[in-house]
Image (cartoon, rainbow, N blue to C red):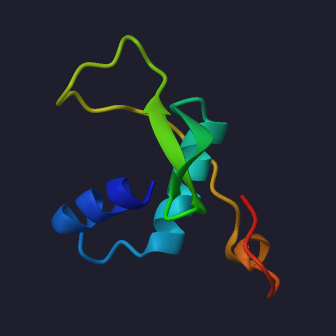
Amino acid sequence: TGQLHREVVEQFPAMERRLFEDLLGGMARGGLVRIEDDQFEKDRQTIRFRRAYLTGTELRQGEPIEARIPVAPPSARKRKSGKRRW
């Protein structure tokens, strides 16, 4: 989802990564996207990342989507310090 975030920031520079991830999470809960964990090997290290896929087969490029996207309130989004988990 990092590459997708970089592409979104080109059009919407104020979109912070954390807020973008929250938005994707809400879209996944709303059934608009599917998010899958993935990984690859580089220089003997495992690089983990997430892929996002649109789920609506009826969606057409350029057409607006009307949807309610459930995003957690700010207090629920605060992370505890520690190692990031996928």
The C terminus - image quarter = bottom right
> Whole-percent x and y of residue 49?
55, 54
Give the side of residue 48 with respect to residue 20, left or right. right
The N terminus - image quarter = bottom left
Above or below — where is 22 with respect to 55?
Answer: below
> Whole-percent x and y of residue 63?
21, 27
Above or below — where is 53 with respect to 49?
Answer: above
Count of picture labels:
0
Question: Which of the two residues, 85 or 40, is positioned nearer the viewer here?
Answer: 40
Residue shown at the point (53%, 72%) measured from the top left: 18
Residue shown at the point (20%, 26%) measured from the top left: 61
Question: Which of the two residues, 50 or 8, is positioned nearer the viewer here?
Answer: 50
Give the side of residue 59 with respect to residue 63, left or right. right
Question: Which of the two residues, 66 or 46, is positioned nearer the viewer here?
Answer: 46
- For the question of whether residue 64 can be seen, the reply is yes
Residue at the outermost front position: 44
> Whole-percent x and y of residue 24?
52, 50
Above or below — where is 20 with respect to 63?
Answer: below
Residue shown at the point (46%, 32%) measured from the top left: 53
Above or below — where is 29 with respect to 84?
Answer: above
- For the question of whether residue 69 can be seen, the reply is no
> Whole-percent x and y of residue 84?
73, 73
Give the side of residue 82 with respect to residue 54, left or right. right
Residue at the outermost bottom position: 81
Residue shown at the point (24%, 19%) measured from the top left: 60
